[in-house]
Image (cartoon, helix red, strand yellow):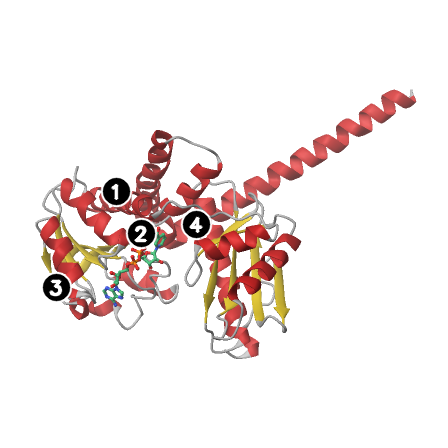
């Protein structure tokens, strides 16, 4: 990526960490802490260049601000990337060292598991003194519950109907989230179609829910009511939008759109798009429930609220002619602005109270 395309000021705080002895090169991007400490995973993959890694950290951190704020969670957005270490690197020492850098953010960043990192890596960071969000429980079932709620809301809102009986839902990726989603929606009468690059996995899940399979390369062109991307990122590109044979797009995969322009292209084609940061927030809501020690009933209610939020966004989009993405981003901006106003108000009323106490003491 060219230097000129990097927005160095995209984050509230950007920390570059390196330790040449240990082979550590990492970037921590804290995008926004208006609502609380920045919560977001640690990605450990190979990047083509340092600037690509740093840009990715900032972009993913901004997406976490949207996800956490829209889900009503008391966290800001942050993310970090570690350049995947070579074979001769002591990974444990590297993760502990990274934990020290996380600690230096003074609690502004709470890391979690992401692509290329494990619970064990997070525990090593915690050993070094960092506060981390990692747990033994797999969040996927809760992510699936949230995606299912968004799918139901999208169908009911788009088609002005109740329930999803008979709706054709094509799930791309029969992994942790996709398989649970297939079961959840099939139980409500949806007709499930499954695609996976592992055809056996697709066939197994399809058989379990009385559905059928399509080849992984036919996902975009297979007619269905809902296409649910639950595998890889950037499935929808401007070039692919004209080829889509779905009426709605609601899934678990992060970064479903290759860029923001796809949202307008989808709307122009009459395809209802639920932004991924709305539909796939079940995982972060699960993390919060563990930290806040909520019981399962409360957690389920919080995750199912994704359905109501989806409905509201689609309703506003329909009424204003904006895309659902634009509506959701504007809503987050408002949430952040209100929170800033509230804390500025609290600061100024605190200052006024101290002034009046001082003048009373002086009198
Ligand atoms: N697991 C969570 O709680 C969670 C939370 C938020 C977002 N997500 C996102 O949701 C997606 C699915 O997560 P998961 O935990 O189920 O992952 P997973 O690895 O368990 O499953 C992914 C599945 O997709 C298949 N796949 C890969 N490339 C494919 C392709 N081109 N076409 C069709 N199938 C393909 C894989 O074979 C696998 O079965 C990921 O993008 C993930 O980042 C997951």
| Disc 3 element | loop
Determine whether, in the image, residue 70 is placed left or right of residue 170: right
Which residue in the structure is indicated by mark 2?
274
In the rendered image, the quadrant that contains the C terminus is top right
Give the spatial CA distance, label 1 vs label 2.
10 Å
Which residue in the structure is indicated by mark 3?
214
Res. 67 mark: 4
Q: Quadrant of ligand 1?
A: bottom left
Give the spatial CA distance, label 2 vs label 4.
13 Å
Callout in the foreground (4, 3): 3
Distance from mark 1 CB to nearest ligand 1 atom below 8 Å? no
Name the spot of residue 96 as percent of width and height, x first.
58, 59
Task: Classify residue 195 by image quadrant.
Answer: bottom left
Name the spot of residue 191 as percent of width and height, x first.
11, 49
Disc 2 to disc 4: CB gap under 8 Å? no
Callout in the foreground (2, 4): 4
Which residue in the structure is indicated by mark 1?
153
Distance from mark 2 CB to nearest ligand 1 atom below 8 Å? no
Crowd tier of the residue under label 4, counting other residues whose Cα lies within 10 Å: few below 14, some 14–19, many 20 or above: many
Circle nearer the N terminus (4, 3):
4
| Disc 1 element | helix
Disc 1 to disc 2: CB gap under 8 Å? yes
Circle nearer the N terminus (2, 4):
4
């Amino acid at each position: 990526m060219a230097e000129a395309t990097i927005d160095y000021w995209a984050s509230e705080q950007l920390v570059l960490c390196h330790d040449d002895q240990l082979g550590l090169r990492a970037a921590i991007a804290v995008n926004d802490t208006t609502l609380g400490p920045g919560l977001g995973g640690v990605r450990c993959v190979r990047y083509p260049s340092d600037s690509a890694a740093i840009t990715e950290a900032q972009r993913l951190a901004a997406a976490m601000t949207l996800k956490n704020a829209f889900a009503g969670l008391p966290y800001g957005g942050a993310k970090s990337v570690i350049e995947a270490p070579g074979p001769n690197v002591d990974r444990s020492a590297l993760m502990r060292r990274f934990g020290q850098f996380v600690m230096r953010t003074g609690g502004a960043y709470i890391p979690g598991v992401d692509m290329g990192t494990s619970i064990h890596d997070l525990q090593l960071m915690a050993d070094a003194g960092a506060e981390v969000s990692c747990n033994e429980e797999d969040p996927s079932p809760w992510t699936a519950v949230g995606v299912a709620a968004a799918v139901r809301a999208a169908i009911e809102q788009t088609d002005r109907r109740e329930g999803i009986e008979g709706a054709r839902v094509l799930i791309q990726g029969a992994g942790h989230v996709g398989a649970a989603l297939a079961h959840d929606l099939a139980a409500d009468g949806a007709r499930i179609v499954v695609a996976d690059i592992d055809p056996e996995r697709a066939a197994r899940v399809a058989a379990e829910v009385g559905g059928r399979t399509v080849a992984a390369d036919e996902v975009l062109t297979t007619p269905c009511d809902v296409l649910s991307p639950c595998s890889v990122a950037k499935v929808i590109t401007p070039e692919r939008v004209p080829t889509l044979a779905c009426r709605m797009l609601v899934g678990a995969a992060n970064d479903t759109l290759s860029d923001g322009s796809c949202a307008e292209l989808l709307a122009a084609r009459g395809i209802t798009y639920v932004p991924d940061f709305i539909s796939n927030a079940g995982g972060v809501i699960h993390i919060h429930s563990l930290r806040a020690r909520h019981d399962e009933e409360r957690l389920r209610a919080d995750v199912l609220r994704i359905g109501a939020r989806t409905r509201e966004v689609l309703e506003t989009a329909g009424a204003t002619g904006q895309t659902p993405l634009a509506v959701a981003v504007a809503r987050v901006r408002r949430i952040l602005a209100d929170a800033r106003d509230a804390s500025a108000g609290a600061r100024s009323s605190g200052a006024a109270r101290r002034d009046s106490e001082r003048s009373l003491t002086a009198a």
